[in-house]
Amino acid sequence: MRLFPRLILALKSKLVILILSVMILTFCLGVIIFQTTQVTVAVAKDGETETVKTHAETVEELLKEMGITVRKNDELSLGLNTPIEDGMKIAYKRAKHVRVTIDDETDDYYTTADTIDEFIEEENISLSKHDDISHDLDESVKNGLHLDVTKAFEVSIDDGGQKQDVWTTGGTVEELLEDQQIDIDKKLDKVHPSFDDEVTKDTEVTITYVDNKEVTDTEEIRFETEEKKDHSLEKGKEKIIEEGKNGTVERTYNVTLENGTEVDRQLVDEEVKEEPQNKVVAVGTKESDPEPKSEAQKPESEAKPVSTEADSDDQELQMTATAYTADCSNCNGVTATGINLKDNPNQKVIAVDPNVIPLGSKVWVEGYGEAIASDTGGAVSGKSIDVHVPTETDAKAFGTKKVSVKIIDE
């Protein structure tokens, strides 16, 4: 009887072992079958490739197994519903967030472009070579990139009379001129608007180059005529005792130029190099005893007053007139009474012999009009005058002529 229970126990142990062996064999067979039925797929994620074995039926199932969620702007080489095949290659690239601010306007983008240049082209963002961009175009696009763009615009620069349109992204006038490599002397040159003003699309910059320099001119001092009464010489006749000679004076000026054109001249020094020598003329005073003339023999000018535009009571003289101008390089342009004819080229002035017409007299000259007797000259003596005209051409055209001269007042 004791043998039977032992036999039963042995049979149970063998059965358990048998069952366990079958289960282990089944599991191993299942593992072998599971592994042998998997397919091999290469997945490239953001440029890094990983080879995986899977029982997934579609690309979407495989990516979920790998913990990859495909978003709207991500790049995937195959559709999510594409069936999985052994040896398949799948490329996946996650989109990166990029924020772009152009002037004062900001937009957000998601892109899979590798470089900023590719991203700008992909999104059709309009840029010019003159625009200011916060990053280099060949930089890689990173998630969270903030691209800042300042658009360029054209402004006009009058550079000392030479006008040009240039591109700028703003800043101050001083920064604009530095960018354009325009050299300015801040102590002398004039710039409008000022250096600190901000540049806008409506800005027009004007540069005036100022230059100060000393200029020395040698100018002529016209000799004067000195008259001496000669009682041995008949009245009305003249005789030159000593010829006159012009002198020279060296004058130094401080000259101001703007864009190369003289705008101001100040006398700083004056030195007489050669004194002028006066012309000495003997004037006859000897009275003659002419036979009395009948009224019919008298010249018309004595018999009847000449009709003029001046008042009939004024003193009238018949004189020889020539013309001169202060518009010449060696002329100082200042008359004997101090009128500056260079500054007043249209001033009505005549040069006279002061012994005939006193300096400062107001006169009327036939064919010339009213003038001031304000100057003298070496060639002006007796009954001759020299009328001032604006240019040498006018002086030549005037020539030499006989004119009536009336002294209006002295």
Image (cartoon, grey):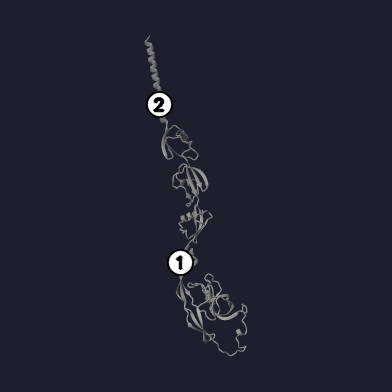
Q: Is residue 231 above or below residue 220?
A: below
> Residue drawn 37% across and 11% down?
3
Q: Camera-side residue: 4 or 83? A: 4
Q: Upstream in the sequence, badge 2 or badge 1? A: 2
- x and y percent of residue 186 in the render? 47, 58
- On the image, numbered disc 1 is attached to which residue? 214
Q: Camera-side residue: 24 or 392? A: 392
Q: Is residue 87 above or below residue 176?
A: above
**Quadrant of image for the C terminus:** bottom right
**Quadrant of image for the N terminus:** top left
User: Would residue 235 be found to the left or right of residue 17 on screen?
Assistant: right
Mark 1: few/some/many CA within 10 Å (<14, 14-19, 20+): few
Q: Amino acid at mark 2?
A: Leu
- On the image, numbered disc 2 is attached to which residue? 29
Q: CA distance from mark 2 to mark 1?
A: 112 Å
- Picture quadrant where residue 53 is located: top left
How many numbered marks have been drawn onto this rendered protein structure?
2
- Between circles 2 and 1, the one closer to the viewer is 1
- x and y percent of residue 79 in the render? 48, 38
Q: Is residue 264 above or below residue 319?
A: above
Q: Camera-side residue: 222 or 129? A: 222
Q: Camera-side residue: 238 or 100? A: 238
Q: Secondary structure at mark 1?
A: strand
Q: Secondary structure at mark 2?
A: helix
Q: Amino acid at mark 1?
A: Glu
